[in-house]
Image: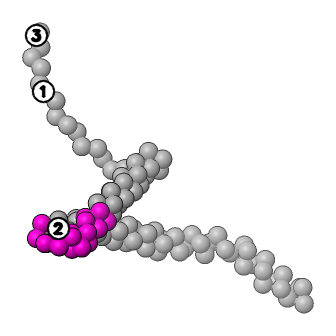
Amino acid sequence: MIKKISSFVIPALVLMPALVFAQSDGVNRLIDQVQNLVARLIPIVIGLALLVFLWGVLRYLFSKEDTEKGQAKSFMLWGIITLFVMVSVWGLVQIVSDTVFGTGGPREIVPSIPRVPGS
């Protein structure tokens, strides 16, 4: 019984790295697709949070009763909180990815004021 199991396990362990490396191209492609999807969704979600905040502002401006104004304040508060959290997390992820992992793209070069030699 042990001989049958070892005759299967040992070749499987020996061939495991080849199997993993053969699949890495597909995994890298999948990771790239997920990153692209998230990069496209983040601005949309931030825009929706901004719309929620603006909807609260409009409801506050056009409401006449205190209960409606309270609900509008709640919309504005949650819109601001959501915007703050999303932008903060997005910024922290960018900082960590740039500094720790070195995945940041090329930096934009800010032009400087030209200087005249000798002045």
Left/right of residue 70 with respect to residue 114 in the rendered view: right
Whichever of labels 1 and 3 marks the residue nearer the N terminus, that label is: 1
Is residue 10 shown above or below 40? Answer: below
Look at label 3 and name its amino acid: Ser
Q: Which mark is residue 113?
A: 1
Bounds of the magenta span? 61-78
Q: How many marks?
A: 3
Measuring from the top left, give residue 114's x and y in whole percent: 11, 25
Look at label 2 and name its amino acid: Tyr
Q: Residues within 10 Å of mark 2 (few under 14, many from 20)?
A: many
Measuring from the top left, give residue 43's x and y in whole percent: 26, 65
Describe the element under mark 1 as helix, strand or loop. loop
Mark 1 and mark 3: span between their CA atoms?
14 Å
Q: Which mark is residue 86?
A: none
In this figure, which residue is indicated by the disc labeled 3?
119
Looking at the rendering, which quadrant does residue 10 occupy? Answer: bottom right
